[in-house]
Image: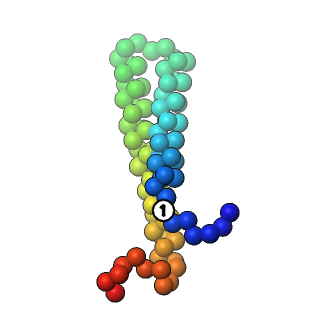
Amino acid sequence: MSGDRGLSLGRLALFSLGAAVAVLGLAVLVLTVLRPGPGVGLAIVGVGIVGAVAAMGIVSKRIVGRAVQDSEDQPGKSDDTTH
């Protein structure tokens, strides 16, 4: 599948949320396997939430960065109409 796709907000949302769900699923798996007490369980959930937010940030930064780099590589397709 080739072609100029650019930045798709739907793809960005899908992959970002998918990464967050994967991290939260891993946290749930750890909780299920370990069956920790309340304090440790809360710490695992906290790490899972922070990890989910971090995963969303990393994935979205990579997707947007790749789209920006692709648009800069194509001369004559400038989004800036002031020049």
Q: How many marks?
A: 1
Q: Residue at x 51, y 46 (%)?
A: 14
Residue 69, placed above or below residue 58: below
Residue 63, placed above or below residue 29: below
Give the left or right position of residue 2, taking residue 69 as reference.
Answer: right
> 22 or 83, which is in the foreground?
83
Residue 75, placed above or below residue 32: below
Residue located beneath label 1 in the image: 7
Q: Residue furthest left?
A: 82
Q: Quadrant of residue 64?
A: bottom left
Q: Residue at x 55, y 65 (%)?
A: 5
Give the left or right position of residue 9, taking residue 43 as reference.
Answer: right
| Residue 68 in view in this figure | yes
Which quarter of the figure is the N terminus placed in? bottom right
Q: Residue furthest bottom?
A: 83
Q: Residue at x 36, y 21 (%)?
A: 42
Which quarter of the figure is the C terminus placed in? bottom left
Tell me the amino acid under the disc marked 1: Leu
Q: Residue at x 43, y 46 (%)?
A: 56
x, y percent for residue 46: 36, 29
x, y percent for residue 79: 40, 76
| Residue 59 in view in this figure | no
x, y percent for residue 63: 49, 58
Which color scheme is applied? Answer: rainbow
Q: Residues within 10 Å of mark 1 (few under 14, many from 20)?
A: some
> 16 or 79, which is in the foreground?
79
x, y percent for residue 24: 47, 32
**Secondary-structure class at tag 1:** loop
